[in-house]
Every structure is written in structure tokens, then in C-alpha cells.
Image: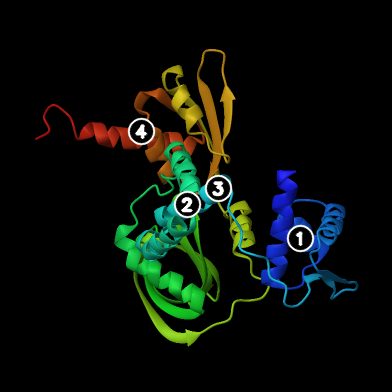
């Protein structure tokens, strides 16, 4: 019943803040069926909540004008979620939202009853939010903050960008969105140099300067859908990589298995890891980290690259080397 009560309150708050919403929109937000939404509306009507419904393509559910929900009391779980969410924002954004997080948690500390605060603190001691960032983005904090403001205000920027191949270019960008993916920050938007949508790693941006020009994001653009589409598209050239790992390191490979990799177990305790790669440089470096406990099965080009790199390393440590 508590889930139902929470959903009823959520419906009231959504209608209060957004106006008219269709049953399908409410169903998607709450992860329930449209039939359930209609049942919830009947329950709200029985509770005396003034819900107005209108049929037709432009219709939906709304609250009678002027109705406001009285101040809410948070449950321990809801209050904990707010505190943990604030910590997560601080962990991800750093200085950009530090003051906002401090202010938000201070307000919560001020309005929550002491008994509830103690429950929240007890929960926080057992629930930790950290480790989202694989690297320290402190050196890029000013650039990240400039991009965040430009995204929010729809302001065009000029930037100096250094690609993976160490090529430096000056670009004019309409930044549509920022995304944290696989521990790295990315900005996506319309690149005027390439006349197309592009994605750039923030830690490869050397400088950012607003131009003062205003742009409009295409109405059909979705940052989430764009990232998913880019992840699903294969590059023009790619390699099917397969590497066999000795039993001594198989447990490490299992623990670090990613969703884009396939793992095959063998009777002797060894494993074979398979995946696709658009180039061979990083698979070569990765294989070498396992020293003599990893053997490249395919492609032949990767095996040759690992062999030649290992020989070059060995040559640096010959007996007669200075």
C-alpha cells in the first residue's frame, strides 16, 4: 500500500508542477500501465483531490486551478535519497555544484525533525556514494563549468581540441548536452568545422571561449538516443579480438568483464575474452599489462604488434645497454 500512496502523491506533484498530462505519460513516468493510472485517478477522486480530465488528442488529466498540495513530510527513505543524491551530484560535478549541494543539505538539516535526521545519518553510514570518477577532473573544472553554462543558456563556444591522434584543431561548437560515460565527461553538439553532430572528450579540450551567439537545439534531438546510436554504430574498420588468459589471472578478467565483451570459460581454469576494437593500439597496451599470462589468439595483426612491442621493450634492457 505504501507504494500506491507514494505514486498517488507523485501524480499530484507532477500535475501540480507540469499542468496537463496524458495517462500514457503518467504511466511511463511511474512504470505502470495506463489502466493502473485510471485506477489511481479514481482513488484520488475518492480522497477528494480535485482531478479534472479531458478527452481528445490535446486532453489529459490536470488539477483544478488553484489547488495546492500541503507541505509534505519525507519518509526516512525519501530523505536518505535526497542526501545521497546531493552527494552524488557533488562527486560528479565537483566545484560546479558544491555551493548548491551545501545549501540544499543545510536546508534539509533545518527542516527535518531530529528523529528523522538521526535515521538518515544512520542510513548514510551504511550507504556510500563515491568512485564514479575514474580520474580527477579538477584541472578541467573551469572548462566543464563553462560548457555546463553554455549548454544551459544555449550559447555557442569556440574551443581548441586535441584529438586522440594529437591533432589540434580550432572548432566552433553548439553544445547540446554534457554526458558522463565510462568515467569520462563528453560534450556533444553541432560542430561547425565538420557541419555535423560530434562528441568530444572534455579532458582533450584545451580552451573554451563563448562567442556570444545563441543557437537552438533541434526539437528531435535526444542526448541519450544519440549516445546509444553512436555506441551501436561500428567504425569503418574494426577487428575481432580474442585473448586467452591463464588460470592465475582469470579471476581478474572475470571481475573486470564489460557488457561489450564476451567471456568463454575453459576446463583448465583459463578464459578467452572476445570483443571488437576499432584500432589495435590500446588492445596491445592492455594485453601487455598481463605480461606472460595473456596470449593473443586473434587477429594476427595484434599478435604481431604485441610481439614487436615486447621485443622493443626487451631491447632496452640488454646486458650491454647503458
Identify the residue position indicated by label 2 in the image.
Answer: 83
Q: Is residue 146 among the parts visible in the rendering?
A: yes
- The secondary structure type at the circle numbered 4 is loop
- The secondary structure type at the circle numbered 3 is loop
| Mark 1 to mark 2 CA distance (whole Å) | 26 Å
Q: Callout 2: 10 Å neighbours few (<14), some, many (20+)?
A: some
Identify the residue position indicated by label 3 in the image.
Answer: 238
Is the Cβ of the residue at disc 1 closer than 8 Å to that at disc 3?
no
State which quadrant residue 176 falls in. bottom right
Q: Where is residue 204 in the image (x, y as percent from the top left)?
A: 37, 62
Q: Callout 4: 10 Å neighbours few (<14), some, many (20+)?
A: few
| Mark 2 to mark 4 CA distance (whole Å) | 39 Å
**Which of these two is toward me, 9 or 224?**
9
User: Which labelled disc corresponds to residue 26?
Assistant: 1
Left or right of 196, for residue 25:
right
Task: Write the residue at 50% across / 47% down.
Answer: 116
> Which marked residue is nearer to the observer: mark 4 or mark 1?
1
The relative height of residue 55 versus residue 130 in the rendered view (above or below) is: below
Q: Where is residue 62 in the image (x, y as percent from the top left)?
A: 78, 71
Identify the residue position indicated by label 4 in the image.
Answer: 289
> Which marked residue is nearer to the observer: mark 2 or mark 4?
2
Is the Cβ of the residue at disc 1 closer than 8 Å to that at disc 2?
no
Q: Which residue lies furthest to the front in this view?
A: 114
State which quadrant residue 293 falls in. top left
Amino acid at each position: 500500500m505504501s507504494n500506491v500512496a507514494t505514486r498517488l502523491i507523485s501524480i499530484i506533484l507532477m500535475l501540480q508542477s507540469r499542468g496537463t498530462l496524458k495517462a500514457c505519460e503518467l504511466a511511463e513516468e511511474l512504470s505502470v500501465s495506463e489502466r493502473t493510472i485510471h485506477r489511481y485517478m479514481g482513488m484520488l477522486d475518492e480522497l477528494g483531490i480535485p482531478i479534472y480530465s479531458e478527452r481528445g488528442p490535446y486532453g489529459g488529466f490536470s488539477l483544478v486551478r488553484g489547488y495546492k498540495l500541503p507541505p509534505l513530510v519525507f519518509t526516512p527513505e525519501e530523505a536518505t535519497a535526497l542526501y545521497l543524491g546531493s552527494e552524488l551530484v557533488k562527486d560528479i560535478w565537483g566545484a560546479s555544484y558544491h555551493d548548491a549541494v551545501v545549501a540544499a543539505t543545510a536546508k534539509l538539516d533545518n527542516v527535518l525533525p531530529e528523529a528523522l535526521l538521526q535515521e538518515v545519518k544512520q542510513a548514510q553510514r551504511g550507504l556510500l556514494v563515491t568512485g564514479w570518477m575514474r580520474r580527477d577532473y579538477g584541472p578541467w573544472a573551469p572548462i566543464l563549468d563553462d560548457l555546463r553554462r553554455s549548454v544551459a543558456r544555449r550559447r555557442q563556444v569556440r574551443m581548441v581540441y586535441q584529438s586522440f591522434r594529437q591533432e589540434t584543431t580550432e572548432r566552433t561548437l553548439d553544445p547540446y548536452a554534457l554526458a558522463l560515460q565510462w568515467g569520462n565527461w563528453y560534450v556533444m553538439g553541432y560542430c561547425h568545422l565538420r557541419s555535423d553532430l560530434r562528441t568530444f572528450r572534455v579532458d582533450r579540450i584545451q580552451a573554451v571561449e563563448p562567442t556570444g551567439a545563441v543557437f537552438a537545439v533541434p526539437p528531435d534531438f535526444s542526448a541519450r538516443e544519440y549516445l546509444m546510436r553512436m555506441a551501436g554504430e561500428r567504425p569503418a574498420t574494426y577487428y575481432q579480438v580474442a585473448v586467452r588468459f591463464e588460470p592465475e589471472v582469470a579471476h581478474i578478467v572475470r571481475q573486470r568483464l564489460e557488457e561489450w565483451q564476451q567471456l568463454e570459460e575453459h576446463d583448465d581454469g583459463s578464459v578467452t575474452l572476445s570483443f571488437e576494437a576499432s584500432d589495435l593500439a590500446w588492445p596491445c597496451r592492455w594485453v601487455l599489462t598481463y605480461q606472460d599470462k595473456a596470449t593473443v589468439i586473434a587477429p594476427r595483426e595484434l599478435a604481431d604488434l604485441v610481439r614487436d612491442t615486447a621485443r622493443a621493450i626487451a631491447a632496452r634492457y640488454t646486458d650491454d645497454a647503458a
